[in-house]
Image (cartoon, helix red, strand yellow):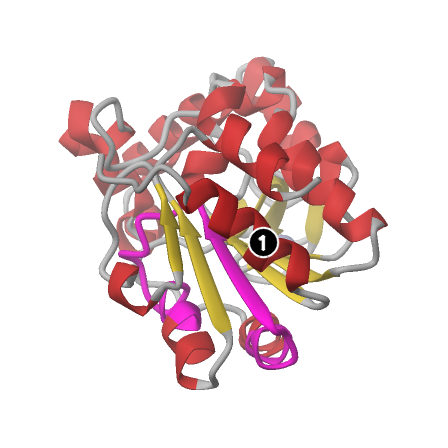
Amino acid sequence: MVREPDELGDGVAVVSAAARITVLSGAGVSTDSGIPDFRGPNGLWTKDPKAERLSSFQAYVEDPEVRRASWQARLAHPVWRAEPNDAHRALVKLEKAGRLVSVVTQNIDGLHQRAGSTSVLELHGSMRETVCLQCNERRPMAEALERVAEGTADPSCRVCGGILKSATISFGQPLDTDVLMAARDAVLSSDLMLAVGSSLSVQPAAGLVGLAAQAGTTVVICNASETPYDDLATIVLRDPLGEVLPALIR
Ligand SMILES: [Zn+2]
């Protein structure tokens, strides 16, 4: 970790001076809430490479075995017991102060909203809903999980019998164009891009930081490890998010 002694102070000054802030948040924001990330040292895919296959859309559609394993993984997911942490709460303060354009998040856990953020763009969807792959009906995830808990290994759509999936973007699925366009608009109407808890390795989400820099928007990156966009940032902070975000947003 390389940080000049006054870099947090510089970060506070830069964030305090900004009037319109777009936040890009990644898995690092939720690790303090007990939700593991994917590629970190304790990440889901680092510890169990097979789990990555569960995130392939094609495998999900073609293989009932993958769907049954996915439903068990959803049922056991730590998100259902997770509470928002200090990093989520700091971003709510930013919105209440009228200085937030949007939280653009790569997270699917809904913890920003649980903390009280209302201007949230979920680039990768939400695991709090299911979507039918045939008729697009959306329902609360809790309904499907209840059926799984009662013994239905691969619950299908009650309307049309189609395959149900969490309303998230799997590998091999395109992002929702409307959400992505809204995220780009948010970035372009901001004077500060604050990228927090993301390794900035997944596109097109990470590219929003490049877009901001290109537009002349100040970029501040807070992440435990290096990102490919660190060189574009005015300030890079490696401190734990539960400490650095409340310090930056006072
Ligand atoms: Zn359906």
Ligand 1 lies under 8 Å from the Cβ of mark 1: no
Label 1 crowd bin: few (<14), some (14–19), many (20+), radius 10 Å: few
Can you give x and y, in whole percent of width and height, for residue 70 in the image?
39, 32
Vertical placement of residue 193 versus 191, above or below: above
Identify which residue is drawn at 43% across, 39% down. Answer: 27
Can you give x and y, in whole percent of width and height, for residue 118 in the image?
79, 51
Outermost residue to the bottom: 215
Which contiguous range is marked in magenta? 184-209
Viewer-side residue, 60 vs 178: 178
Residue 182 quadrant = bottom right
Identify which residue is drawn at 25% across, 22% down. Answer: 42
Give yes or no for residue 201 being in the magenta stretch.
yes
Residue 57 quadrant = bottom left
Quarter of the render that holds ligand 1? bottom right
Can you give x and y, in whole percent of width and height, for residue 234 in the image?
39, 63
Q: Quadrant of the C terminus?
A: top right
Identify which residue is drawn at 28% across, 28% down. Answer: 44
Viewer-side residue, 154 vs 185: 185
Judged from the image, the secondary structure of the residue bearing numbered disc 1 is helix
- List the residue tagged with mark 1: 13
Residue 93 quadrant = top right
Can you give x and y, in whole percent of width and height, for residue 185 in the image?
62, 80
Q: Is residue 197 visible?
A: no
Identify which residue is drawn at 47% across, 16% down. Answer: 76
Please state if 114 lies on the left or on the right of 9 as rendered: right
Vertical placement of residue 21 versus 30, above or below: below
Q: Is residue 43 visible?
A: yes
